[in-house]
């Protein structure tokens, strides 16, 4: 098998796959006593637009480094590859947060000590810092990034760190860390690249299903994966696109917007219900809640704040998913209006929502290009609303704006 098996999950565009494969081979050579070839470094920065596959590439790279096959690094078959791709490998650390910023105690107390420990079950340790733009703290300070600076400047011999961020812009990633990392940029993948990646991950699924998910993903790998594998994701997209048609129903549009807003709050609760129950149960067990005997009550006294902290963390996670759902719905709506605008102008551009071409054509007949452009502006304004505003308020206000632009109910 080609030694790029797990790296087949990485788009080949811009030579990214070849660079990572060279780094993996360099790592193997160093373990065998060869002189460093210069392809491997201890600190990496993967950048690219949303959906370009930054995290996918990072975990594929980690799996290839942790592969145990002596002849086929990154084989995709061994225990090292399988557990790394599943996120359960003992020498792989996923650094992430449900909050808007990483918390300094987490970086100092958990991440940095892990980075300094030597690997025991593999030749390397690999940490993937997702959403590395969240290393910025409130006020624009870089306390979390600065805490990581020493380990990046003087990395442990067998530790690899991969940061994932939207860009190298100082607003997205620490300047001081950037200067000490090797930069790999992942461009927006083509539909064919996304389809190829999905086939590599899910070879048992029908080709037409894979091709559809890739075609309607707007170049977003994670979005394509969700549409392919998750019925709720497909249904949510359908509701968003249906809302565009419902705008021309004076009352029905508001009802659909209200229902979508309520669902945006309900879906995260359903999605995380089992996990949250398990987390609360595990915390209780670790604290001895429910234990009997002398000293049990005293041992568990003063633990309420731990449950409160966990519940706050769970709420942040639900809120973030709700915001992501709303943003994705608004993105889908904007793409449909964009297709309508290009149709009205006769631009001949490839549609972003190919399975709703009839709706786009109908919008192009109903509204002049100027109105369609204003509709896109209205959706953009809705996406820019503060996170404190409830989805129901945002969606119903948007429907009102779109109805005014479409002169719905005006004779």
Image (spheres, helix red, strand yellow):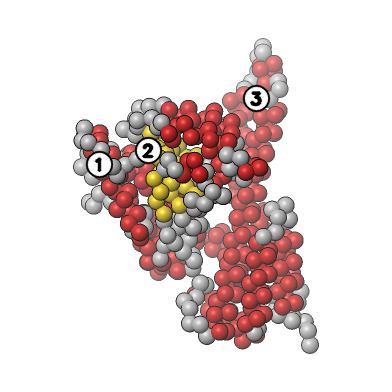
Q: Is residue 277 above or below residue 299?
A: below
Which residue was labeled with disc 1? Answer: 37
Q: Earlier in the sequence, mark 1 or mark 2?
A: 1
Q: Are marks 3 and 2 in contact (CB under 8 Å)?
A: no
State the CA–CA distance, disc 3 to disc 1.
55 Å
State the CA–CA distance, disc 1 to disc 2.
13 Å
> Does residue 386 appear in the picture of this structure?
yes
Q: Are marks 3 and 1 in contact (CB under 8 Å)?
A: no
Label of residue 42 in the image: 2
Q: Is residue 343 above or below residue 316?
A: below
Residue 290 appears at what percent x and percent y? Answer: 65, 24
Label of residue 223 in the image: none
Residue at the location (63% across, 72% down)? 376
Question: Horizontally, is 268 left or right of 350 in the view?
Answer: right
Residue 4 appears at what percent x and percent y? Answer: 28, 51
> Which of the two residues, 173 or 114, is positioned nearer the viewer here?
173
Question: Horizontally, is 195 left or right of 239 in the view?
Answer: left
Quarter of the image where one finds residue 207: bottom left
Residue 50 appears at what percent x and percent y? Answer: 50, 57
SS type, badge 3: loop
SS type, badge 2: loop
> Which of the two residues, 58 or 377, is positioned nearer the viewer here?
377
Q: Earlier in the sequence, mark 3 or mark 1?
A: 1
Q: Earlier in the sequence, mark 3 or mark 2?
A: 2
> Which of the two residues, 149 or 236, is positioned nearer the viewer here?
149
SS type, badge 1: loop
Which residue was labeled with disc 3? Answer: 289
**Mark 1: few, some, or many residues within 10 Å (few <14, many ≥20)?**
few
């Amino acid at each position: 098998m080609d030694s790029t098996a797990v790296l087949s999950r990485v788009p080949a565009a811009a030579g990214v796959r070849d660079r990572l494969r060279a780094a993996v081979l360099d790592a193997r050579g160093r373990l065998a006593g060869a002189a460093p070839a210069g392809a491997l470094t201890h600190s990496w920065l993967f950048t690219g637009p949303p959906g370009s596959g930054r995290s996918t590439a990072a975990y594929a790279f980690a799996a290839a480094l942790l592969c145990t096959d002596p002849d086929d690094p990154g084989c995709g078959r061994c225990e090292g590859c399988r557990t790394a791709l599943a996120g359960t490998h003992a020498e792989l650390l996923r650094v992430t947060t449900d909050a808007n910023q990483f918390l300094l105690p987490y970086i100092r107390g958990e991440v940095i000590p892990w980075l300094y420990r030597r690997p025991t079950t593999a030749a390397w340790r690999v940490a993937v810092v997702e959403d590395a733009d969240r290393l910025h703290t409130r006020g624009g300070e870089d306390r979390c990034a600065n805490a990581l600076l020493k380990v990046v400047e003087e990395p442990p011999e067998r530790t690899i760190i991969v940061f994932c961020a939207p860009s190298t812009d100082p607003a997205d990633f620490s300047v001081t860390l950037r200067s000490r990392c090797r930069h790999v940029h992942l461009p927006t993948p083509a539909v064919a690249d996304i389809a190829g990646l999905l086939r590599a991950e899910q070879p048992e699924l029908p080709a037409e299903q894979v091709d559809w998910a890739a075609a309607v993903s707007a170049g977003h790998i994670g979005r394509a994966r969700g549409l392919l594998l998750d019925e709720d994701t497909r249904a949510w997209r359908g509701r968003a696109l249906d809302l565009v048609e419902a705008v021309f129903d004076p009352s029905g549009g508001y009802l659909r917007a209200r229902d979508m807003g309520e669902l945006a709050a309900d879906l995260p609760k359903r999605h995380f219900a089992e996990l949250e129950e398990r987390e609360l149960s595990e915390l209780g067990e670790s604290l001895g809640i429910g234990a009997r005997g002398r000293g049990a009550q005293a041992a568990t006294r003063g633990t309420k704040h731990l449950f409160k902290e966990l519940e706050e963390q769970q709420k942040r996670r639900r809120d973030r998913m709700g915001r992501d759902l709303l943003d994705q719905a608004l993105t889908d709506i904007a793409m449909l209006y964009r297709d309508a605008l290009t149709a009205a102008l006769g631009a001949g551009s490839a549609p972003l929502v190919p399975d709703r071409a009839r709706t786009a054509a109908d919008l192009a007949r109903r509204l002049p290009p100027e109105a369609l452009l204003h509709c896109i502006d209205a959706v953009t304004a809705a996406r820019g609303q503060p996170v404190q505003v409830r989805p129901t308020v945002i969606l119903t206000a948007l429907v009102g704006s779109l109805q005014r632009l479409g002169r719905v109910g005006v004779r």
